[in-house]
Each structure stands twice: as C-alpha cells, then as structure tokens.
Amino acid sequence: MIAPRGSRLIAIVGGSGAGKSWLVARLCELLGDKACHLELDDFYRDCSALPPARRARVNFDIPHAIDWHAAERALFDAEAGQPTRVPRYDFATHCRRIEQEAWQPRPLVFVDGLWLLRRPDLRRRFALTVYLDTPLPLRRSRRLARDVVERGYDAAEVARRFATEVAPMHGRYVEPQKRRADLVLAQPFVEAEVVALAQRLWSLVEATAPLPPWMHETFRAELLARLLTHESCP
C-alpha cells in the first residue's frame, strides 16, 4: 500500500554491528503492512571491475563506498510514495548483482545505514532520525559473527579490518552523527528511550495510516516487550 501523500522516511543510524537491521526488523513486524525496510548497504559501489585481490583492499567503511546518486534516487522515490528499483549487493564478492528488485514503499519507510545523517540536505528528508549507541566490544563481536557465518570471511581478517578500518572510521564518520539524531537509543535498551521512540512512531503512524486511538497503548506495550527482553538483540 502507498500512503496517499507519500511516505515518511525514518533513519536508523549506527556503527557496523550496532543492531540497525535487527531493530528495523522488530519495528516492521510490529507495524505490519504500514512499514518497510530500505538498506543503505544495498547501494555499495560495484567492485566487479576490480580483480578480487584489489577488492579485498577497498575500504568499505567510508562514505565514498556508497553510490549516493542511486541511493538518493531511491529515497526520493520512496518519500514520494512511488515504486523504485533497488540494487542488490553481494558481500561475498563485493559486486552488485545483475538483477534489481522492484521495490514498493509503504507509509513508513525505515532506512538503515552508517552515514545517513552526515549531510544536511539528506538529513532533512527524514521525518525521524534515530542513532543506535552501541558499545564497541558488542559491535565487534556482532561484526565477527555476521561476517564469518553469513558472508564466509576469515575470522582473523575480520578482526584485523575491524581494528584498522571499521573502528577508526566509526570514530571519524559515524559517531559524530549522534548529535544530529532526534533520538539516541543506548544498548542495552533503556525503557524511557523506547517509550520516546514509541511516541514518535505513533505520531507518524497517525499522520500516514491512522489506527484506532485505543491501539496506542497496545503499540507502546508491544514495542517495550520486543526491545527490553534480555534475549532480544543478539
């Protein structure tokens, strides 16, 4: 479904391993057909023209690694409530897949990525901006688990790149965005911060795809239950 007056974009920003995709998945489960997910990671620049050895030396933790022209086109289409095409990136080969997905926005579009809040012109596109403030040891352990299990990377190489590229670039490019966010969510999640998120999200739901008022408290309780359980975020 498309919101009659377009869609509202919500930025979920944080470092690699911060839990961005996990949080968006929980929010989309709760909001059902009123929300969808767009990932900045799908807009990494295609490295197919480079030999494999050269690809392995590319720094993927700097903003220039993203094809911003394609990403912004998709964001602008989504904001207008219009269908768009989204590339698919293969992290095992560092290449863009040939096929592109026809993608339809919903009233609320959660966009997760490392660098969505750096530029004022892009930041203004978002109706709500959220920064996930996750401790470095937790981000490192998640990154190691993801890259080894899901992407087939060598554990020692993942650890090396985290120390030499991911962590330094986080401090340079990602962490400074925290002061630009409307909401900052610490991990483990704090109840007061989750309640603030629930209130902001409910306001956007009311503005795009209204629900009966009696559902407000149910929505808040459900969000708290999904984010505050000990086993929630891996």
Image (cartoon, rainbow, N blue to C red):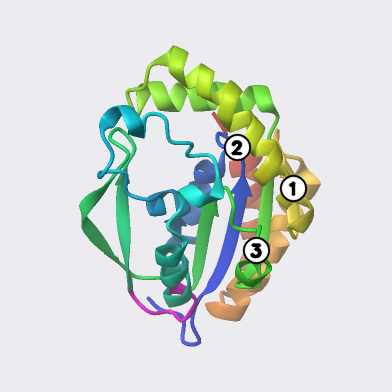
Q: Is residue 212 above or below residue 192?
A: below
Give the percent coordinates (x, y) of residue 53.
31, 27
Label 1 sits on a secondary structure element that is helix
**Residue type, numbered disc 3:** Arg
Q: Is residue 119 magenta?
A: no
Element on which disc 2 rests? loop
The residue depicted at 32 percent of the width and 49 percent of the height is 46
The residue to which callout 1 is attached is 176
Contact (Cβ within 8 Å) of mark 1 with mark 3: no
- Where is residue 199? Give x, y as percent: 72, 63
Please tell me which residue lies in front, 141 or 177: 177
Q: Residue at x 26, y 61 (%)?
A: 101
Magenta region, main secondary structure: loop
Q: Is residue 217 left or right of residue 54?
A: right
Name the kind of residue labelled 2 in the image. Ala
Residue 83, quarter of the rendered image: bottom left
> Reading the chain from its start, which is encountered first: label 1 or label 3?
3
Q: Position of residue 87 (x, y in %)?
A: 31, 57
Residue wearing tag 3: 119
Of tags 2 and 1, the one toward the viewer is 1
Q: Does the magenta run of residues contain 81?
A: yes
Q: Is residue 231 in sight in this rendering?
A: no
Residue sitting nearer the eye, 62 or 189 = 62
The residue to which callout 2 is attached is 18
Q: Nearer the viewer, residue 232 or 41?
A: 41
Task: Determine crowd level at label 2: few under 14, some 14-19, many 20+ residues with C-alpha closer than 10 A.
Answer: many
Disc 3 vs disc 2: which is toward the camera? 3
Q: Looking at the figure, which quarter contains the N terminus? A: bottom left
- The alpha-carbon separation of the residues under discs 3 and 2 comes to 21 Å
* Distance (Cα) linking label 2 and label 1: 15 Å
